[in-house]
Image (spheres, helix red, strand yellow):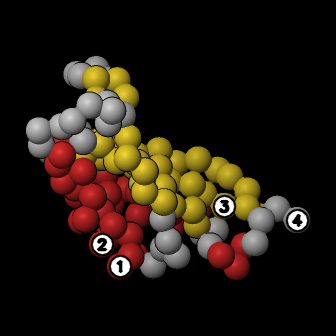
Amino acid sequence: MAFAATTVTIIAERFLQDGILKLLEEAGTSGYTLTEGSGKGRHLTRTHERPSLVRDFDIVRIEFIMLDGEKARAIAQRITSEYFAEHSGIVSITPTEVLRPERF
């Protein structure tokens, strides 16, 4: 049986990663997935296939899933307010379904 949940995806520059992960842990998420990223946006193209002079400006993708959708949205809003008022980044919220709800 599948259970309703919420996925929050954060795309951020690597130098923001530690603060965002600390916030997630303090907010009570059960875990997260962290992936090195590359892509193209309005301002530039980033690729992890070439050496970067300053790795802090590479991008990462951080995702977490929560059964409590309101709490997931509140965490997403806090990340947006605290980290992306002055830095570029993306936060998306997606309804999802999970098996093994005890993991979330």
State if disc 1 and disc 2 touch (CB < 8 Å): yes
The local secondary structure at tag 1 comes to: helix
Where residue 52 sits: x, y (%)?
Answer: 18, 37
Circle on res. 22: 2
* Disc 3 versus disc 4: nearer the observer: 4
Q: Is residue 1 above or below residue 89?
A: below
Question: Which of the 4 image quarters holds residue 70?
Answer: bottom right
Circle on res. 26: 1
The local secondary structure at tag 4 comes to: loop
Q: Tell me the kind of residue under disc 4.
A: Met
State if disc 3 and disc 2 touch (CB < 8 Å): no
The local secondary structure at tag 2 comes to: helix
Q: Determine the residue positioned at 18% across, 46% down.
A: 55
State if disc 1 and disc 4 touch (CB < 8 Å): no
Q: Determine the residue positioned at 30% across, 72% down.
A: 22
Q: Which residue is mark 3?
A: 5
Where residue 14 sits: x, y (%)?
Answer: 24, 51
Q: Residues within 10 Å of mark 3 (few under 14, many from 20)?
A: some
Q: Is residue 3 above or below residue 40?
A: below
Q: Tell me the kind of residue under disc 2.
A: Lys
- Mark closer to the chain start, 1 or 3: 3
Circle on res. 1: 4
Circle on res. 94: none
State if disc 2 and disc 4 touch (CB < 8 Å): no
Q: Tell me the kind of residue under disc 1.
A: Glu
Label 4 to label 2: alpha-carbon separation: 32 Å
Label 2 to label 1: alpha-carbon separation: 6 Å
State the quadrant of the N terminus: bottom right
